[in-house]
Image: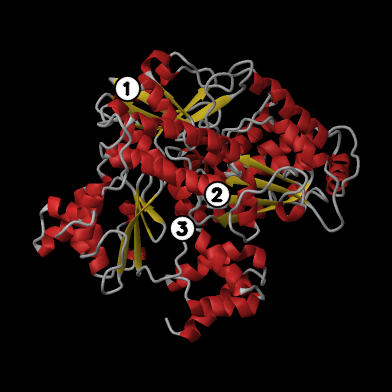
Amino acid sequence: MHAEAVAGVVDRVVARYKRDATCMVQILREIQEACDWISPEAIDRLQSTLGVPRTKIEGVAGFYSFFYLQPRGKYRVLFSDNVTDRMGGNRDLRDRLCNALWVEPGKVSEDGLVSVAMTSCTGLCDQGPGLLVNNYAIGQLTEERIDRIAELIRERVPMTQWPAEFFKIEDNIRRADILLSSDLTPGDALRAARARAPDEGLMASNMRSWREGLPSGIGGPIAMLDEIKRANLRGRGGAGFTTGLKWEACRNAPLKAGHQRIVVCNADEGEPGTFKDRVLLSKFPDLVFEGMTVAAYAVGATRGFLYLRGEYRYLLDHLNAVLIHRRREKLLGENILGIPGADFDIEIHLGAGAYVCGEESALIESLEGKRGTPRNRPPFPVTNGYLDQPTIVNNVETFAAAAMIALNGGEWYAGMGTKHSAGTKILSVSGDCERPGIYEYPFGVSIRQVLEDCGAKDTQAVQVSGPSGVCVAPNEFERIIGFEDIPTAGAYTVFDQSRDMFEMARNYVHFFQHESCGFCTPCRVGTSLLKNLMDKLHKGAGSPYDLAEIEKLNLLLQSMSHCGLGHTACNPVLDTLAKFRPAYEKRMMQQDFVPAFDLDSALAQARQMTGRDDAGAHLSSVHGGAA
């Protein structure tokens, strides 16, 4: 694309975002979608139109793995490399596509048409192996489908003309409870919240009062908060913080002049093996948006964001259409339900491939158009969040549950689940089972019950809550899903007896090393050292010394890392080492320390090419002897 055309694209995109540099991530995404990459000419134009230093623009673009500062082709193919994709043969399918397109993995074809590489989990674990083409998801890969994709790329067929069935993503709802069987009519939860105020005039007064940081009357927002507390709703993103307390802290936070309260839905479910939010947003978007609006009413917020992971780009147009419909029905925008002062709207920001942005403060940094680096806390987002304004950040599932609580009441919700874990939990079940997909249970369901329901046989282990969670062995299958036993963000990955648990842990370690944001040295270096140690064991060069080093790394990462990624990076190794030690011991071929780097092996190919394949002569020359 010529420089003039690039400048035209940049100007149109920047104008659409009103020259707001806090929208930098969205601006860069739209420029790349139009130009295939973010060229120096585009950065030059951005620098002049936004008044932002070039180094900052490049720093933001360089942070996210889905942004390209070098040409990566008209078709950018990324194979999902989660452990379940590996189990489904993704590497063989990648090699098949590369051979068909005459391109090396990780590189761009000589004609500049296509690149093929790997990426982290794309949220298609129930229908993998999967891939992304220009960030649009394709699942259920087979050799036949790969051959067809290669043909379409070779013929330069626009993606808008590719077969529609390629982009069909199944919901695979296997067991539904209160959320996945919801038939909520849009607006019902808001009307129920309004009914808790003595009259509409008081509700409008409450909305204005909370927005301005003043005390409100009885009922309305206070009544809604009381219902959330009565329900004992806890965050569904994994940490399990009490939702009512978070919302109340935001509501009570003082507002500075010109500030407002913010509601953020965290839909950046990047934990490998998790895909429940994908289904909620695909099938029940009104339930989620209704929950966000209920939260806005409770805390007095006027602006909301849904931060959608980049791998779910295909959902963006669908979700925006739902928002447009809600505005038309007076369920968003000004004077919601016709009530003066009840103002709240939602906009969607799309991520760009950064697992760390699932952490709430990193997500807020990204919303502000920055690199997704986790913040130091305190202060917490409830007092100093988006643009230093009081902000609540909750998971997709949490907001869906909040809508149901607004509709049916807190006591109804608290009556499900267990004493310490009220309500239901949606599990993303994948791996070695007959019926992978989405399962919703009241809290308290056992690991064994889920295995029976999904058709798992001869199960060796279950990884709950992804790499940062816990690996459950057969003698623990009576344990339950709940905050008092095994908390989870939703991932539930099944491994049968044919699987190598060391290789499972090694895949997760590679994931953590790839997704480390690099901000803090302990995590940046520690995850790389951990990866190297696991690779060394994989090659059969391990010794007891290496296992001791892993233990030391765990202590370092837990005590010194800036955020949760580093704190949990060793979890899959330590869990599998404790429960499946033979998988490690069979790789420890040495009793004494052996260096990971073997100079003789590294030079073997060069000696063979030059005809000097005498290893002894080579070693002699290394030590100063005659060649």
From the viewer's perspective, is the residue at label 2 or at label 1 nearer? 2
Q: Which residue is mark 1?
A: 460
- Looking at the image, residue 483 lies above or below residue 84: above
Please tell me whether mark 2 sits on a helix, a strand or a loop.
helix
Please tell me whether mark 1 sits on a helix, a strand or a loop.
strand
- Residue drawn at (24%, 53%) of the image: 623
Residue 35: give x, y in percent of width and height.
Answer: 44, 73
Indicate the amino acid at tag 2.
Thr
Q: Is residue 101 left or right of residue 487?
A: left
Task: Work out whether residue 200 can be spotted.
Answer: yes
Task: Work out whether residue 11 can be spotted.
Answer: no
- Residue drawn at (53%, 55%) of the image: 351
| Upstream in sequence: badge 3 or badge 1 | 3
Indicate the amino acid at tag 1.
Gln
Q: Which residue is mark 3?
A: 65
For the residues labelled 2 and 1, the Cα–Cα distance comes to 36 Å
Q: Mark 2, residues whose alpha carbon is within 10 Å: few (<14), some, or many (≥20)?
A: few
Indicate the amino acid at tag 3.
Ser
Image quarter for residue 538?
Answer: top left
Residue 499: give x, y in percent of width and height.
Answer: 27, 29
Residue 270: give x, y in percent of width and height.
Answer: 48, 44
Which quarter of the image is occupied by the N terminus?
bottom left
Q: Nearer the viewer, residue 6 or 409?
A: 6
For the residues labelled 3 and 1, the Cα–Cα distance comes to 34 Å
Please tell me whether mark 3 sits on a helix, a strand or a loop.
loop
Q: Nearer the viewer, residue 367 or 449?
A: 367
- Looking at the image, residue 243 lies above or below residue 382: above
Residue 449: give x, y in percent of width and height.
Answer: 41, 17
Q: Which residue is mark 2?
A: 521
Q: Nearer the viewer, residue 334 or 49?
A: 49
From the viewer's perspective, is the residue at label 3 or at label 2 nearer? 2
| Upstream in sequence: badge 2 or badge 1 | 1
